[in-house]
Image (spheres, rainbow, N blue to C red):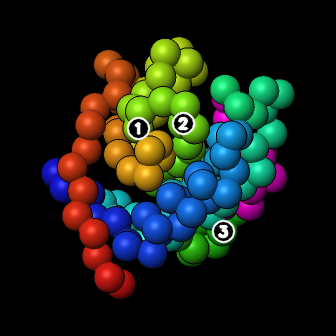
Amino acid sequence: MTLEVAREALEEMVAEAAQAAPEEACGLLLGEEGRVAEIRSAANVALDKQKHFEVDPQVLIDAHRAERGGGPQLLGYFHSHPQGPPEPSATDRELASGDGKIWAIVAQGMVRFWRDDKDGFEPLSFALTDA
């Protein structure tokens, strides 16, 4: 399956990562199954923001409420690796839940997408869309 990603969402993730450096940026991926239409940035509330990310819980709660009210679906999460490649780190692998959500990892000006499956992270191919 090829994930569709709105060009604007991808550009916003790269910009958020650059702005947050040397700390990790983070947020949510929103849309509908198979298509990331937008992102919602969140404060990184981790204790060590240069090595970890933790999405502000209120942003997550608000996204779930919006989804239940007919808003966009919470597809997954994004975060940046200011010092590493755009692939799951050992910490990412350790803390992943295997819930099938999509993770976008931003590093070195690039974004790669992964599915957090019960057997670990699987890379996802993606295509940019303009709308």
Most foreground residue, 46 or 110: 110
Tag count in the figure?
3
The residues tagged by marks 2 and 3 sit, at their Cα atoms, a distance apart of 28 Å
Tag 1: amino acid: Pro
Q: Secondary structure at mark 1?
A: loop
Can you tell which mark lies on residue 81? 2
Can you tell which mark lies on residue 58? none
Q: Which residues are magenta?
A: 52-64
Q: Are marks 1 and 2 in contact (CB under 8 Å)?
A: yes
Can you tell which mark lies on residue 66? 3
Give the crowd class for mark 2: few <14, some 14-19, many >=20 residues within 10 Å: many
Q: Secondary structure at mark 2?
A: loop
Q: Foreground mark, 2 or 3?
A: 2
Q: Main secondary structure of the magenta part?
A: helix
On screen, 57 above or below 51?
A: below
Q: Secondary structure at mark 3?
A: helix
The x, y position of residue 82, in whole percent, is 57, 38
Tell whether position 9 is magenta: no
The residues tagged by marks 3 and 1 sit, at their Cα atoms, a distance apart of 29 Å
The x, y position of residue 114, in whole percent, is 35, 39
Q: Is residue 61 visible?
A: no
Q: Give the residue number, with chain letter if any, for mark 1.
A: 86
Q: Residue at x 28, y 32 (%)?
A: 122
The x, y position of residue 73, in whole percent, is 50, 63
